[in-house]
Image (spheres, helix red, strand yellow):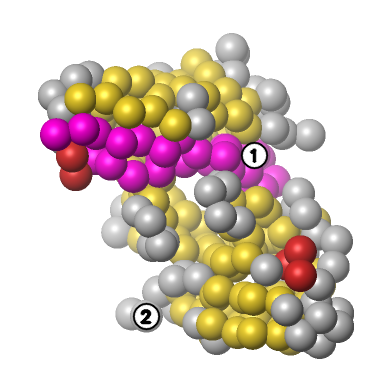
Amino acid sequence: NAGVTQTPKFQVLKTGQSMTLQCAQDMNHNSMYWYRQDPGMGLRLIYYSASEGTTDKGEVPNGYNVSRLNKREFSLRLESAAPSQTSVYFCATYGLAGGTETQYFGPGTRLLVL
Amino acid sequence: KQEVTQIPAALSVPEGENLVLNCSFTDSAIYNLQWFRQDPGKGLTSLLLIQSSQREQTSGRLNASLDKSSGRSTLYIAASQPGDSATYLCAVRGSASKIIFGSGTRLSIRP
């Protein structure tokens, strides 16, 4: 099992460019999340999806859009990147695995906006 | 609106000491609370999860408690070791599956 995978691992964008961060899971979990983590900070929730077909705003949704394509995939889109969006982006799922309920994280995508 | 606060932001203690990390939340209508560890430049590792109906959970030298009515959780680390140095994050899950993190406590254990 791959768990939670994210692509790309690293990306450099120029201000105004757009891009989509991809996230996929093979854990059959209903809930999926996108967070950003700035240096020395905790994780801030951008958007989440409690189940396939639903998405909701988190703490910092401005400048982002999401798509829950199916149960496995949850993508995050930056329509017009800004330097303030330079951050590490983590995708996560939530559910049961091995009898334990917990949140599972992908390896992260490092995004630099120039 | 749920807000999660962790105090202190940073903590440095000598090896062998017992220590307590604090997490507070503003909305007591939570489903569960989870503690994570994050090493520099790495992802998150789950340490303990406490359901809203539970008072505490233990794993080895770690003990997490939850007082839902007062909006507080503590993570107790016994006999600290240099390998415990990391950032510790708490995360609160509400009934609608929304999970909010605190800003973390950066812990340094001095040999």
Q: Quadrant of residue B14?
A: top left
Please give the label number shown on residue B94: 1
Q: Amino acid at mark 1?
A: Gly
Q: Residue at x 33, y 80 (%)?
A: A1
Q: What is the x, y in percent for residue A15?
A: 81, 81
Residues at marks 2 and 1, CA–CA distance in whole angstroms: 27 Å
- In this rendering, is residue B36 above or below A52? above
Segment tinted magenta in the rendering: B84-111
Instruction: Let me know if residue B10 appears in the view.
Output: yes
Tell me the crowding category of disc 2: few under 14, some 14 to 19, or many 20 or more residues within 10 angstroms, Cα based: few
Tell me the crowding category of disc 1: few under 14, some 14 to 19, or many 20 or more residues within 10 angstroms, Cα based: some
**Which is nearer the eye, B104 or A91?**
B104
Magenta span main SS: strand
Q: Amino acid at mark 2?
A: Ala
Element carrying mark 1? strand
**Screen quadrant of the C terminus of chain B:** top left
- Residue indicated by mark 2: A2
- The answer for which chain carries disc 1 is B
